[in-house]
Image (cartoon, rainbow, N blue to C red):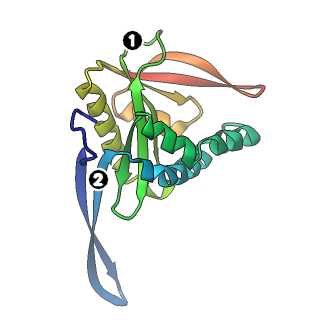
């Protein structure tokens, strides 16, 4: 990715965690996060993040049976094939596990004026709310820009309040709306764009 040709880290962050408990002396630990291109060996870990994140984000938004079918379609083999075939996927690697991923590429919606698109950006629910999503978003946005794709679009279901707030806080402007079919149910989705 990024003309690097290798799976070298795109971004790295060290976090110092000080834990104070009355019954123990202070302890310190360091967590190193790396954002890097996904490898085929990451497929099972990406699947686990996808499953947990989708169930947490869309329970009650996408009808249950349809949500489960969507989750089941994205197993390790699906991710391994996507990565092997050259899909752009970044992972947030904590050193002992994959905590999130972003998939991206050329914009698929001709009606939206942007060349790049982040198709998916998800974190394992236990890693949400810590600023890791912002870093993954920034790395994905930079990756698309390095590939010469001007402008960015990200689609989110309008009922996914957390995602809509996340993209709004990062300066995304709603540029389009569309309907998504889930069986017989319809849900609105919105396109956030950046220049």
Return the x and y of residue 61 as percentages of the image width and height: 66, 38
Residue at (68% x, 36% y) in the render: 62
Residue at the right extreme of this rendering:
184
Quadrant housing the N terminus = top left
Q: Quadrant of residue 136?
A: top left
- Which residue reaches farthest top? 111
Q: Position of residue 88 (x, y in %)?
A: 38, 34
Query: Residue at image x 54%, y 50%?
Result: 47
Give the Cα separation between the discs numbered 1 and 2. 31 Å
Image quarter of residue 192: top left
Q: Is 77 above or below relative to 172?
A: below
Instruction: Determine the secondary structure under disc 1.
Output: loop
Asked if residue 49 lies left or right of residue 131, the reply is right
Query: Is tag 1's residue or tag 2's residue first in the polypeptide sequence?
Result: 2
User: In the figure, 167 relative to 47: above or below?
Assistant: above
Q: Is residue 93 left or right of residue 156?
A: left
Q: Which mark is residue 169?
A: none
**The furthest residue to the bottom:** 23
- Residue 169: image x %, image y %? 37, 35
Q: Quadrant of the C terminus?
A: top left
In this orientation, which residue lies closer to the viewer: 8 or 92?
8
The residue lying at 33 percent from left, 28 percent from top is 171
**Placement of 3 over or under 65, stated as above or below:** above
Of tags 1 and 2, which is closer to the observer? 2
**Which residue appears at 26% of the width and 32% of the height?**
142
Where does label 2 land, which residue?
34
Count neighbours of disc 2 (C-alpha within 10 A) and say few if under 14, some if 14 to 19, many if 20 or more. many
Residue highlighted by disc 1: 113
Q: Is residue 14 left or right of residue 173?
A: left
């Amino acid at each position: 990715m990024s003309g690097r040709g290798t799976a070298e880290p795109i971004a790295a962050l060290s976090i110092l965690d000080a834990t104070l408990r009355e019954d123990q002396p202070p302890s310190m630990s360091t967590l190193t996060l790396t954002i890097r291109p996904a490898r085929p060996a990451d497929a099972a870990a990406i699947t686990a993040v996808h499953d947990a994140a989708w169930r947490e984000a869309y329970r009650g938004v996408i009808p249950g049976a349809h949500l489960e079918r969507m989750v089941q379609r994205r197993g390790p083999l699906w991710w391994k094939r996507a990565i092997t075939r050259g899909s752009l996927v970044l992972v947030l690697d904590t050193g002992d596990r994959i905590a999130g991923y972003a998939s991206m590429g050329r914009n698929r919606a001709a009606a939206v004026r942007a060349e790049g698109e982040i198709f998916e950006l998800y974190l394992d629910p236990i890693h949400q709310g810590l600023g890791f999503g912002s870093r993954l978003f920034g790395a994905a946005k930079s990756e698309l820009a390095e590939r010469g794709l001007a402008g960015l679009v990200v689609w989110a279901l309008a009922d996914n309040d957390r995602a809509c707030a996340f993209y709004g806080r990062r300066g995304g402007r709603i540029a389009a709306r569309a309907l998504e079919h889930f069986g017989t149910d319809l849900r609105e989705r919105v396109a956030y764009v950046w220049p």
